[in-house]
Amino acid sequence: MKKVAISGLGVISAAGQGISETLETFSSGRRNGGRVSLFPTALSYPVFEVKKIPAQWHKEGMRTLSLALCAVNGALRDAGLPDDLSRLKVGVCLGTTVASQLNDLDFYRAYRKTGKAPMEPVNRFLEGNLAEAVAHAFKVQGPSLTVVNACSSGADAIGAALSWLRNGICDIAIAGGADELNRVPLCGFGSLGIMSESFCAPFDRERSGLNLGEGAGVLILESDEICRQRGKTPIGYLAGYGIAADAYHLTAPHPEGKGLEAALRKALAEAGITPDEVCFVNAHGTATPDNDKVEGTLLARIFGPDIKVLSTKGYTGHTLGAAGGLEAAFTVAALREEWIPASIGFVHQDSEIPLAPVTEKTPTEKGYGVSTSLAFGGNNTALVFASAFSHRYKSRTSPPISHKDRSTV
Amino acid sequence: MYIAGIGIIFSRGRGIESFSHALQKGWKPPQFIEHASFSDKPIPLYAVDQEFIMDKAVLGKSRRADRFCKMAVLAAWDAVKDSGLSDVLLNGSMSPGEDAPSLGIIHATALGPHTTTFRFLDDILDYGEANVSPTAFSHSVHNAAASYIASVLDIRGPTITVSQFVFSFHQALLLAQSWLEEKRCDFVLVGSTDECGQVMEYICRQKLHIADDGRIKPFHFSASPEAVPGEGSVFFLMTQEKNLPAPARYGEVYEISLFDHQNEEDAPDICLIETDGMTGDETACRNDIIPGAYVAGYSPLFGSFMAGSGFQCAAAALMLKRQIRYACPVQDNPYGVNLCTATEPSEIRTIYSFRHCCGHKKAVIKLRR
């Protein structure tokens, strides 16, 4: 199986723009959340907004795309790649939720009232398909795919890009996710009763729901060979990807985490490792009662109760389609930096969850890190990343997955 | 990769036999919908009749699902049934010691369940931000349909929904091919679904040149082509397994080209040209015609929609399986291209299906017997 290197990271969220600023926020334990300021709303849930998008990437009325362009640019710079990618065999695979919907309230209000509405919001929607717009902006000639798998969109976009690279569909892939803070999910998650009135507390006994956030997280993936040929040292490797459906419920996870377990086992098998080789798990950890109980219980069962676990949603909020991309980038950065941040918000152990996340900045070894994503629709995704200089991840190929393993996924 | 089954729901029915029947019978006018915004001009629309979406036996688990989801569930279900492999794939009836093959889902859409999104916006406008329906919200996400498919068919493999305006179905097919190559699963249900609600009818009227006579004219190769909006869902059961039972032998998708495709010297038997007025200037599409090949286009049967390439692909697969060349439903032919003008038995080995976008981008799906 082709070894897939990570050569660049680009992030923007309430925790900062770029990896350095974000790690500083993580290190300090700051939470840059507050009331919604992007649009007038009667809802008082705290959120995590991006305070400033660089003017260069600002597109009026296309906030998700602006966030994505900013992160993609950061990742390309980090990878040492040019702005014009037309001469390379590059693909774009990005996840989102908000940017895929025509949900402009002013447009719809006008349509309802008069039977007519201005076409500008429609034009912005049609021009703003995330992967297509990013491909256009950076002159990408290869495949472009917008993944809309709800909250696992960013992680699944990275997984789809891995498939492209392994199958030679492109040599380099821009992969991750982006989403803006928007009224539709704010009202929607509110209606589901899973938003917290205070800052979220993933895995805490007193957790009362999620906070919404926004941002973009992008990885530059490329074949190890191409990466080294152009003189770039990989930051890390994408070693395994697992995805599985619960086939259970539209909004609730399977109570025993069956789909997540299948996704994790598949990702570990692809990476050719056992659970005890994983240094830490960057969990989905939304701070909803259901998610954290199912996820925490399963992680303890697979990795043991002493596994180092964190959720970064306490710093970024739940960024929906961006979450998988951001958390993948944070996982790779943690492997490089050899530390994980405190899982902010956690104070009280929940007796129903047989593990506790880390409560302070914690050193980790070089090795493997896992990022998990769970989504509406019962989708579950796991990504396994390896340190660049891990002696263990060389050119090992994963063992063939038995027919039995595949059938249980 | 091989096409082992097809499920389809469109304006003229549900199931591959309905599609086959439509191909044989030829063009029928669309419905003409009165729209409050255009009182003098009804909008032609290939709408899916509600009666085609009623199937309590299949949709029992998805009774709360919206129309978009139900169309997708039925098409996916029918694709598996059509293959003759449903006992193995859905019921897991294997020989002792054998494991059931794994099944994945890739669902493509351009516009997703937008009628549900607008219903949710109705809630915000009518009842306020704090009083919206959680059901409308959870169904407004694009992957709700794939979730229902997984639930109804009890599929626990990889499940992805993708949304593109350009080549959505082609991108889904390309990813399916990768999944099968990687052995991420043994079978993949690849499909595309789009619906056309009232707001979209308005947008279509504003953004497109609508064919007020209800006839898409695929071979006019016009700079400002006319469209007739359509809706529906089509799913394909794809696999790398060669030894398929007879009902499942539709043929092989052997190449999906999304960039820099050059016409080859060897002509296919048929070039399918997907010119439906959805993607602007169609003048360049005339270049896709390969000398020696018959030319066909079937969008006048099901209408214009961005993720509609799957319908054209279904026509190609049927022709390969049944070795019948179907007459083009609308045969206006100002450039005198070598059209399929009659439905007749024919030896068909290869079919290329072309789709252009914005005059310069091109995608090709190549199929063979």
Image (cartoon, coloured by chain):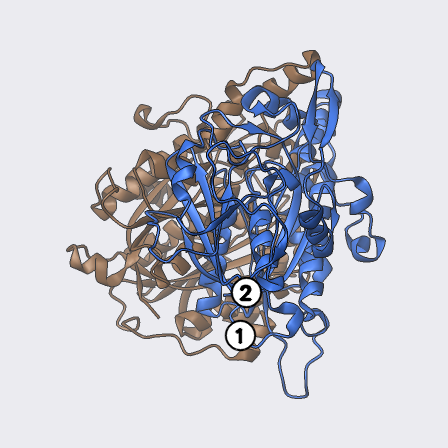
Chain colours: A brown, B blue
Choose top left, top right, bottom left or bottom right for residue B84: bottom right
Counting from the top left corner in percent of width and height, residue B160 is at: 55, 53
Q: Which residue corresponds to the image point at 25% horizontal and 62% vertical from the top-left?
A: A224
Q: Which quadrant would the C terminus of chain A be assigned to in this image?
A: bottom right
Counting from the top left corner in percent of width and height, residue A183 is at: 59, 28
- A72 relative position to B156: left or right: left
Q: Which quadrant would the N terminus of chain A be assigned to in this image?
A: bottom left
- A227 relative position to B89: left or right: left
Choose top left, top right, bottom left or bottom right for residue B237: bottom right
The amino acid marked with disc number 2 is Gly
Is residue A375 among what the camera can see? yes
Is residue A203 among what the camera can see? no
Q: Which residue corresponds to the image point at 42% horizontal and 46% vertical from the top-left?
A: B363
The residue wearing badge 1 is B242
**Label 2 with label 1: CB-CB less than 8 Å:** no
Which mark lies nearer to you, 2 or 1? Answer: 2
Crowding near the residue tagged with mark 2, few <14, some 14–19, many ≥20 C-alpha atoms within 10 Å: many
**In which chain is the residue bearing label 2?**
B
Crowding near the residue tagged with mark 1, few <14, some 14–19, many ≥20 C-alpha atoms within 10 Å: few
Q: Which mark is residue A124?
A: none
Mark 2 vs mark 1: tell me if same chain.
Answer: yes
Asked if residue B270 is positioned above or below residue A257 in the image, the reply reads above
Q: Nearer the viewer, residue B82 or A59?
A: B82
| SS for dot 2 | strand
Q: Earlier in the sequence, mark 2 or mark 1?
A: 1
The CA distance from mark 2 to mark 1 is: 10 Å
- B44 relative position to A140: left or right: right
The residue wearing badge 2 is B251
Counting from the top left corner in percent of width and height, residue A199 is at: 55, 38
The amino acid marked with disc number 1 is Lys
- B16 relative position to A340: left or right: right
